[in-house]
Image (cartoon, rainbow, N blue to C red):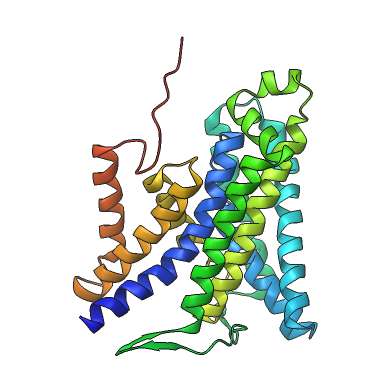
Amino acid sequence: MTNVIEQLINGLRTGSIYALIALGYTMVYGIAKMINFAHGDIIMVGAYLLYVFIDIFKLPIILSVVLTIVMCSLIGVFIEKVAYKPLRKAAPLSVLITAIGVSFFLQNASLLIFSANPIKFESIIKVNAVHIGNVSIAGITIVTFIVTSIAMVLLTSFIKYTKTGYAMRAVSEDKGAAQLMGINVNRTISITFAIGSLLAAIAGILFLSQYQSLKPTMGALPGIKAFVAAVLGGIGSIPGAMLGGLALGVIESISKAYISSQLSDAIVFSVLILVLLVKPTGLLGKNFIEKV
């Protein structure tokens, strides 16, 4: 039983990172109605930025974290302006191909700058483990879960209760009508990308603190799994992204421990297929009637 509980805790730790990334996916899809497959690579960019600020520039940890988050937000806005804004009225397939191209560009740029060799990095989170009976909960697990929970609450409150949040919901419903009401659609979408990249930067910092190794492709698989988590929970739903990420992390952890570490990814994607067969909109997704 102790081993099962520990695997569940490990799953919640990994799932919290997936949830953070999935929040960014669901934000961009909910407002801009596009899947930003380069989102996972912002995790990698954030991790490398943190490494540069701390190990190369020797900046204080808190300042490095703040600079990493700010830089990733600016990079997210820049990518939206350069790669996605010109395709605002293009076919969805064109936007999807562009997103994949941006993903490969970020990976190869990192490969040219830092090489393919993994870089060791000491975790910046120094929190002691908590012991409850025979169960030990690592400090990084506690911090990751708390940060993810706070991010979800703040994001939900921001969307529901702020003027910018109202604008985001209006743009999500109807871009044309929102523009007629005086809402700056381009600025609203840029803010959405900034928030999504901010969440990816935080996820990158936590991911790096957990695995303590950098490489140019480190964000690819977590990005795909986070997209799966967003779809599993109901893409466009903030609580759904949180639930989907945690569920995915637990399923992956249990699969690795008790079934097969080599088949864990296949099991994760199989669960997604089963859920979508039963409920195509995801666990917390809603059905919408489109009038034609």
Which residue shows up at 39% across the image and 68% down it? 12
For the N terminus, the image quarter is bottom left
Which residue shows up at 75% across the image and 17% down it? 180
Count of numbered badges drawn on the protein: 0
Q: Is residue 285 left or right of residue 124?
A: left
Looking at the image, is 211 positioned above or below residue 80?
A: below
Picture coordinates of residue 89 (x, y %)?
Answer: 65, 25
Picture coordinates of residue 218 (x, y %)?
Answer: 52, 68
Q: In this view, does 249 lie to the left or right of 1?
A: right
Picture coordinates of residue 13 (x, y %)?
Answer: 43, 71
Looking at the image, is 261 positioned above or below residue 84?
A: below
Picture coordinates of residue 128 (x, y %)?
Answer: 51, 90
Which residue shows up at 41% across the image and 52% down it? 229
Between residue 176 and residue 105, name the one nearer to us. Answer: 176
Which residue shows up at 42% across the image and 19% down it? 289
Question: Residue lying farthest top?
Answer: 292
Q: Is residue 132 left or right of residue 200?
A: left
Res. 107 visible in picture: no
